[in-house]
C-alpha cells in the first residue's frame, strides 16, 4: 500500500498564508501567472483603469491552428485532431467564468465558422465534428447568459447562421434563448423567421430541400414555443403533401391526449393520400387507446372511409381487446354486470381472429398487420451469405501433412 495522500490546503489557510507574505514576492508571483493567462492579465489591466484590455488575438490564433486543416485528416488522425480542437475550446469556455463573456460570444461564433469551413477535410466517422459544434453552442449560450449582447443583433446572427449553415448550427435555439433575447430580440427573431417562411414556394411532394427544412423547422419551433400544440399544428397544416404530414399532426394531438381531434385530422387527410399506409401506421397504435374508446371507434366509425377500406381482415390485423376475444360481450367500465349490445364490428373482429392460423396469431404486430393489409406475410430476413445457420459448424480441417507422409489415396 502507498503512502496516504496529504489533504489539500483549505482556502482559509491559504488566505492566512498570503496575508503574511512579502508584498514584492506576491507581485512577482502574480505577474508570472498573468503572463501565461491572458484573461488574468486583462482583469488586472481593467482593474488598473485600462479600457478594452482583453485582446482575443492569441485565442483566435490558437483556434485557427487547431481547427484549420491545410490538406485532409483521415480516420486515424481524426481523434487527435478533435482532441486539439477541444483544448482550444477550453480556452474559450474559460473566458465565460473569467468575466469576458462578450468576448467568448464572438470567439464561439468564429470557431463555428472555422469548423464548418474545415468540415469537408476531416473524416467524421466517429461524430467528432457534431460533438464540437454542440459544445460550441453550449459555450455560446452560457456566454450570452453571462454577458450582455445586443438582443436584436443576436437574433439576426442566430437566424442568419442557422439558414446558411449546412450542419444545423443554431437550429434549436428556442426556448433556450428566450430569456437572453428578451421581447425585442424575440420580435426580431420572429420577424426574420416568418419573413423567410412566407417566401418559401408551395411545397411539392417529396420536396426535401435543405433550406426549406431549416426555415420550416425554425418556424415550427417558434410556433410551438409561443402557441404550444395549436401553434405548431397551424404551421404544419400549411403544407400537407403526404401522409407523413397528416400523421405528424395526429401523433402530436394524440401525445396531448386529444384523440378525437387526431382522428378528425386523419379523416380529413386520408381522403387525399394513401389510405392503406396511413392506417397501417395509425390503427395499430390506436388499438391501445385510453379506456372508453371502443373497437369500432378506433376505426373512426362503421361508416367512415377508414372503416370501409379497413375490412374485417385488415381491421383485426392487431388482435382485438381481450374482452372481444373471450367470446362474450364486453362490460361497460361503470357496471361489472351490465352487458352492451352486440357490435357487428366486434363480431367480425372475433370471427377473423378465430379464423387466423396459429402461425398468424404468433406473428409480431407488424407482420400480422402486413398479413391483413397486403394479404401475405412479410418474409423473414434472409440469412447473410457469410453467416451460418444456427447449429451448423464448419467441417473439421484436413490434418496437416508432415514431410515424408504419403499423400492420401483418392
Image (tube, helix red, strand yellow):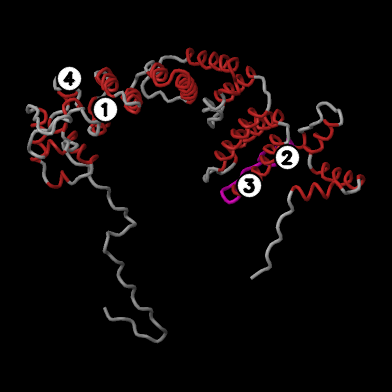
* Label tally: 4
Q: Quadrant of the C terminus?
A: bottom left
For this rendering, which residue is in front, 121 or 315? 315
- Locate residue 272, reporting x and y percent: 26, 18
Q: Secondary structure at mark 4?
A: loop
Residue at image mark 4:
304
Q: Residue at x 72, y 30 (%)?
A: 103
Give the distance between the C-alpha atoms of the residues marked 1 and 4, in whole angstroms.
15 Å
Q: Is residue 118 left or right of residue 361?
A: right
Percent across and percent down for residue 21 are 88, 49
Residue drawn 32% across the image and 57% down it = 387
Q: Residue at x 63, y 21 (%)?
A: 154
How crowded pointer 1 is (Cα within 10 Å; few <14, some 14-19, many 20+) is rated as: some
Q: Which residues are magenta?
A: 59-77
Q: Between disc 1 and disc 2, whose residue precedes?
A: 2
Above or below, 402 against 313 in this view is below
The picture places residue 257, in percent across and down from the top left corner, at 32, 26
Residue in the foreground of this view, choosing between 362 and 347: 347
- The stretch drawn in magenta includes residue 185: no
Numbered label attached to residue 62:
2
Closer to us: mark 1 or mark 4? 4
Task: Indicate which disc, 3 or 2, sits on the residue closer to the N terminus.
Answer: 2
Disc with the residue nearer the chain's start (1 vs 4):
1
The earlier-in-sequence mark between 1 and 3 is: 3
Residue receiving disc 1? 278
Nearest to the eye among marks 4 and 2: give it: 4
Residue 83 has which mark? 3
In the rendered structure, are the residues bearing label 1 and label 4 in contact, judged by CB atoms less than 8 Å apart?
no
Relative height, residue 224 to residue 319 (above, below):
above
Q: Nearer the N terminus, badge 4 or badge 2?
A: 2
Amino acid at each position: 500500500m502507498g503512502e496516504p495522500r496529504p489533504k489539500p490546503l483549505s482556502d482559509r489557510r491559504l488566505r492566512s498564508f498570503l496575508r503574511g507574505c512579502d508584498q514584492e514576492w506576491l507581485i512577482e508571483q502574480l505577474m508570472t501567472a498573468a503572463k501565461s493567462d491572458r484573461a488574468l492579465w486583462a482583469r488586472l489591466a481593467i482593474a488598473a483603469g485600462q479600457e478594452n484590455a482583453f485582446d482575443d488575438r492569441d485565442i483566435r490564433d490558437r483556434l485557427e491552428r487547431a481547427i484549420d486543416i491545410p490538406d485532409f485528416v483521415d480516420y486515424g488522425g481524426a481523434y487527435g485532431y478533435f482532441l486539439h480542437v477541444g483544448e482550444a475550446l477550453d480556452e474559450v469556455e474559460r473566458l465565460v467564468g473569467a468575466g469576458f463573456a462578450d468576448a467568448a460570444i464572438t470567439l464561439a461564433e468564429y470557431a463555428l465558422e472555422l469548423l464548418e469551413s474545415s468540415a469537408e477535410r476531416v473524416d467524421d466517422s466517429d461524430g467528432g465534428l457534431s460533438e464540437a459544434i454542440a459544445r460550441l453552442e453550449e459555450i455560446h449560450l452560457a456566454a450570452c447568459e453571462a454577458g450582455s449582447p445586443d438582443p436584436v443583433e443576436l437574433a439576426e446572427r442566430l437566424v442568419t447562421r442557422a439558414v446558411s449553415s449546412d450542419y444545423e448550427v443554431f437550429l434549436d435555439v428556442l426556448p433556450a434563448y428566450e430569456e437572453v433575447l428578451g421581447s425585442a430580440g424575440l420580435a426580431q427573431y420572429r420577424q426574420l423567421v416568418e419573413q423567410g417562411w412566407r417566401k418559401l414556394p408551395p411545397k411539392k411532394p417529396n420536396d426535401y430541400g435543405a433550406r426549406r427544412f431549416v426555415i420550416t423547422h425554425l418556424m415550427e419551433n417558434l410556433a410551438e414555443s409561443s402557441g404550444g400544440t395549436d401553434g405548431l399544428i397551424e404551421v404544419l397544416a400549411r403544407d400537407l403533401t403526404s401522409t407523413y404530414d397528416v400523421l405528424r399532426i395526429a401523433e402530436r394531438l394524440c401525445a396531448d391526449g386529444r384523440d378525437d381531434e387526431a382522428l378528425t385530422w386523419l379523416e380529413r387527410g386520408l381522403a387525399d393520400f394513401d389510405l392503406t399506409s396511413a392506417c397501417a401506421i395509425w390503427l395499430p397504435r390506436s388499438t391501445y387507446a385510453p379506456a372508453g374508446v371502443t373497437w369500432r371507434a378506433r376505426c373512426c366509425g362503421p361508416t367512415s372511409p377508414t372503416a370501409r377500406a379497413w375490412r374485417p381482415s385488415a381491421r383485426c390485423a392487431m388482435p382485438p381487446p381481450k374482452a372481444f376475444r373471450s367470446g362474450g360481450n364486453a362490460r361497460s367500465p361503470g357496471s361489472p354486470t351490465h352487458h352492451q349490445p352486440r357490435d357487428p364490428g366486434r363480431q367480425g373482429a372475433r370471427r377473423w381472429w378465430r379464423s387466423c392460423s396459429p402461425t398468424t396469431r404468433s406473428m409480431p404486430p407488424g407482420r400480422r398487420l402486413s398479413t391483413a393489409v397486403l394479404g401475405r406475410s412479410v418474409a423473414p430476413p434472409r440469412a447473410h451469405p457469410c453467416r451460418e445457420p444456427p447449429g451448423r459448424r464448419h467441417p473439421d480441417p484436413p490434418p496437416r501433412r508432415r514431410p515424408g507422409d504419403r499423400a492420401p489415396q483418392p
